[in-house]
Image (cartoon, rainbow, N blue to C red):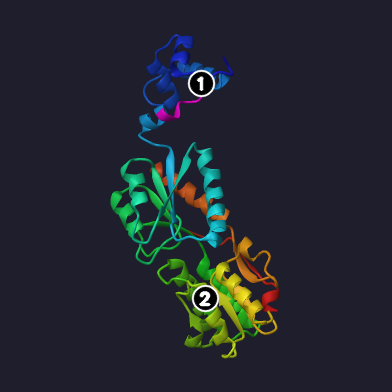
Amino acid sequence: MADEKITIDDVARALGISKTTVSRAISGKGRVGDDTKTRVMNYIKEHNYRPNVAARALAKQRTYNIGVVWPDDYNAVDLPFFQRCITGMNEVTSHYGYDIVITMIGIDDYSGLKRLVENNKVDGIILTRTLVKDRAANYLKNCGIPFVVIGSIDDPDIVSIDNDNFGACRELTSILIAKGLKRMAIIGGSTGHVITNTRFKGFMTAFEEAGIKVDKSLIYLDVENKAKVGSILKELMNLSVDGVICMDDSLAGELISRCRDEHIMIPDDLRIASFYNSTILDSAMPSVTSLNFNDRNLGAVAAKSLLDMIDGKEVENQMLNSYEVILKESTK
């Protein structure tokens, strides 16, 4: 019988006690004598008993699922980040007997998220991106379901787990300034995303601390069209810049490609760095100065925080400092 799946009925019959007694011994709830509890625990250990997940969920009013929300406007270059986060989350959730349900939402359409919550499909939610006007986060807050966000958010009542993007971006920018790059341009994506504003703040703070004024004509934000990167490059080559910092690996990769098309040599004609690194830049020539973050750990910490919240524990915001500044050929 050790290799077969056994039930509470089987345990009760084998030990000559009621199913209720077996259930109480396993759950630790209700009055059960120490000797009886020991007999039950020894028996189920010997016979490799595993509680039925559906029955356990019903007893605790849990689904043993957590929802993970991806933005529906993600593209191929975003996948490495989400994949590493999910890997970290799964390592934690599987240990606690939980599964992950993934849904996607848009800036204005979070119907998929609402289905998970309103149909009681999950015990909690992880949002993998924060927005300046975050309707999904506000919806979850109003619902009262346990949830955490990956990224920073301007709401003290919402638990956020984030890498120290501000500190990392400030540090990389400061290093480049110290290397003599005092006239740098910056190219970033949507200012509707909190991460864009955080990275920009780190960039600007580094210049403020160095006592250098940033030329506003060298700031390019809300760049979400690849064709726009080409036109920006042409402008920059006429503005005598020391270098360019791209806010992510996608923009950095596109800028390098445009430089190749225009026969602009890196780093001789233009120095380039990125505030984020992934496999997208692994094959870049030359190798790109960038920031490396431990996204796997970020996902794991977010998942553990959510599970603690589901269990009724106090959970606080966490800012993770697990990043590296990697100086490579592109800024020499």
Residue 238: x and y in percent read: 58, 91
Residue 313 visible (yes or no)? no
How many callouts does the rendering have? 2
Q: Which residues are magenta?
A: 50-54
**Which of the 4 quarters of the picture holds residue 273?**
bottom right
| Looking at the image, residue 185 lies above or below residue 102 | below
Q: Residue at x 48, y 16 (%)?
A: 35
Residue 319: x and y in percent read: 49, 61
Q: Which residue lies under the disc numbered 1?
A: 41
Label 2 secondary element: helix
Q: Residue at x 43, y 67 (%)?
A: 194
| Looking at the image, residue 134 lies above or below residue 312 | below
Q: In the image, which disc is placed on residue 227?
A: 2
Q: Main secondary structure of the magenta part?
A: loop
| Looking at the image, residue 75 lies above or below residue 274 | above
User: Which amino acid does the dot numbered 1 rest on?
Assistant: Met
Q: How far, Cα to Cα, is label 2 from label 1?
A: 66 Å
